[in-house]
Image (cartoon, rainbow, N blue to C red):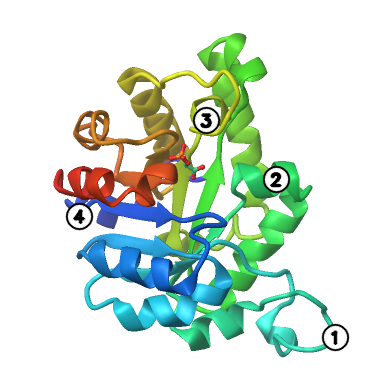
Amino acid sequence: MFLCRNDTMKRKMKKIIIANYKMNPQTEREAVKLAHAEDREGVIIAPPFPFLIPVKKALKKAMLGAQDVSTVSPLAGGWGAYTGAVSASMLKKMGVQYVIVGHSERRGFFNETDVMIAKKIVIALEAKLKVILCVGENADVRAQGITPAKAFVAEQLQKDFSEIINNKSAFKNIIVAYEPIWAISTTLYRKDVTLEDAETMAEYIKEQYPVRVLYGGSVNARNASGLLAQKNIDGLLVGGMSLKLKEFKKIISNF
Ligand code: PGA
């Protein structure tokens, strides 16, 4: 575990906003139209795999992100008999710059384990992709208080970084997104995060690792400026509201 922050972290870095389209929109045409309208510096657009190339063509200022990557290593060729898999080297060749790894929906719906996530991080970095690692506790953990929530996040990070922990330079290419599951817009009985909660966890993560930290979970036009004003929050990961152009434009008007 790294206890001191990387010097580059101390320099003022521009905040970033990720538009995670998840499994939306329904057509390539809609995806391209949306991405084109959201094309701003500091924005990373992460559409579903089939829309990556058309979206890339529509972007001039924003960067391109993928929502997942397979565990097939580019060092093993990054190709072969792996039905359904999309390799890191394929993504890189398509012009993808960032990849989201460990989203709670992948952990929950697709049974992704920390072992798989740790592997994906190594593989993405080998292919020269930047990693956006999502972590965050569920409502049951949070109900026990901030200390168990911190312990949960610390354990996720420790497991997910287990393969790179001795490679300090790897952390330059990693961003952590703190996404408490209980605050995500599609979670049943969701709750609003407080600025204090989000900032406390971002600070806690930075105390342990030299990474930039984003907040994600029901980011909208009303809460974006407050979140972005927090000292330890380096940007936002936006799900549902990245599909609503008016709302997203208001969110990005804050930076
Ligand atoms: P949300 O999604 O903004 O719709 O809550 C965030 C996420 O799950 O990445």
Q: Earlier in the sequence, mark 1 or mark 3?
A: 1
Seen from the viewer's position, the closer of residues 174 and 167 is 174
Q: Nearer the viewer, mark 1 or mark 4?
A: 1
Q: Amino acid at mark 2?
A: Arg
Q: Earlier in the sequence, mark 1 or mark 2?
A: 1
Q: Is residue 32 toward the left or the right of residue 145 in the image?
A: left
Q: Nearer the viewer, mark 4 or mark 3?
A: 3
Q: Which residue is mark 3?
A: 180
In 3D space, how far apart are the residues under numbered discs 1 and 3 (Cα atoms)?
Answer: 36 Å
Q: Quadrant of residue 216?
A: top left
Q: Quadrant of residue 7?
A: bottom left
Seen from the viewer's position, the closer of residues 18 and 249 is 249
Q: Which residue is mark 4?
A: 14
Q: Quadrant of residue 226?
A: top left
In 3D space, how far apart are the residues under numbered discs 3 and 2 (Cα atoms)?
Answer: 13 Å
Say which mark, if any, is on residue 107.
Answer: 2
Q: Amino acid at mark 4?
A: Lys
Confirm if mark 3 falls within 8 A of ligand 1. no
**Residue shown at 56%/40% (left/top)?**
135
Q: Nearer the viewer, mark 4 or mark 2?
A: 2
Q: Which residue is mark 1?
A: 81
Q: Earlier in the sequence, mark 4 or mark 3?
A: 4
Which element type, helix, strand or loop, lies under badge 1?
A: loop
Which element type, helix, strand or loop, lies under badge 4?
A: loop
Whole-percent x and y of residue 89?
59, 84
In 3D space, how far apart are the residues under numbered discs 4 and 2 (Cα atoms)?
Answer: 29 Å
Q: Amino acid at mark 3?
A: Pro
